[in-house]
Amino acid sequence: MIEIIASINSAIETVRKLGVLNEKIKDADVKMLIADLNIELANAKNSIAELSTENQKLKVEIDELRNNKMEKLQFKRGAYYDTAGDGPFCPGCYDGKHLKSRLVDNNPDFNFIGNYKCSVCTKMFKVTE
Ligand SMILES: [Zn+2]
């Protein structure tokens, strides 16, 4: 999106330069074409702004749909569990990325940090049984 806006701004600058050049030539037809080009570029810039706004709205809508479709997990004793009681699943992955990542037993040497480790993000968690 930023590249498109930069291109249009560059085109507007080129049109401005053409206008300066035409001051020397004083051709009425060229002046009319430059005016038309300015109008078209302004219209394109407005269209991009509208598309950008619409794109933002659609992104929010997609996030809402994903959240509604996402399986609801229950948080208890430091981790998430599904309705069948399967788990524990990673709180960081579920809350942040809507992923149902399994927690696995951690190396006992690191139990002072956490007794479980996420199989995806590798963060450690203390989960009480
Ligand atoms: Zn995780």
Image (cartoon, rainbow, N blue to C red):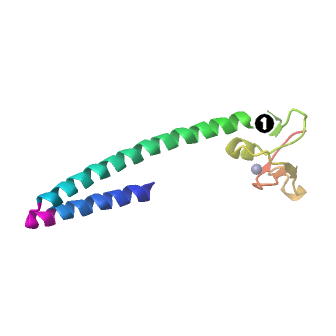
- Depth check, front residue: 44 or 105: 44
Image x and y of residue 69, in percent: 73, 36
State yes or no: residue 7 in magenta. Answer: no
Q: Is residue 119 above or below residue 24?
A: above
Q: Residue at x 69, y 46 (%)?
A: 97
Q: Quadrant of residue 27?
A: bottom left
State yes or no: residue 21 in magenta. Answer: yes
Image x and y of residue 74, in percent: 80, 33
Asked if residue 47 lies left or right of residue 92, the reply is left
Q: Is residue 15 above or below residue 92?
A: below
- The answer to whether one can see residue 24 in this image is yes
- The quadrant of the rendering that contains the C terminus is top right
Asked if residue 120 lies left or right of residue 50, the reply is right
Q: Residue at x 15, y 66 (%)?
A: 21
- The quadrant of the rendering that contains the N terminus is bottom left
Graded by Cα atoms within 10 Å as few (under 14), some (14 to 19) or many (20 or more), the crowding at tag 1 reads some
**Residue position for label 1:** 71
Q: Is residue 75 above or below residue 47?
A: above
Asked if residue 67 lies left or right of residue 100, the reply is left
Q: Residue at x 74, y 43 (%)?
A: 94
Image x and y of residue 39, in percent: 26, 49
Q: Residue at x 90, y 35 (%)?
A: 85
Question: Of helix, strand and loop, which mostly describes the magenta segment?
Answer: helix
Q: Quadrant of residue 65?
A: top right
- Depth check, front residue: 106 or 12: 12
Q: Give the residue type at disc 1.
A: Glu
Q: Is residue 15 above or below residue 82?
A: below
- The answer to whether one can see residue 112 in this image is no
Q: Secondary structure at mark 1?
A: loop
Write the start and end of the magenta stretch as one range: 20-27
Image x and y of residue 43, in percent: 33, 47
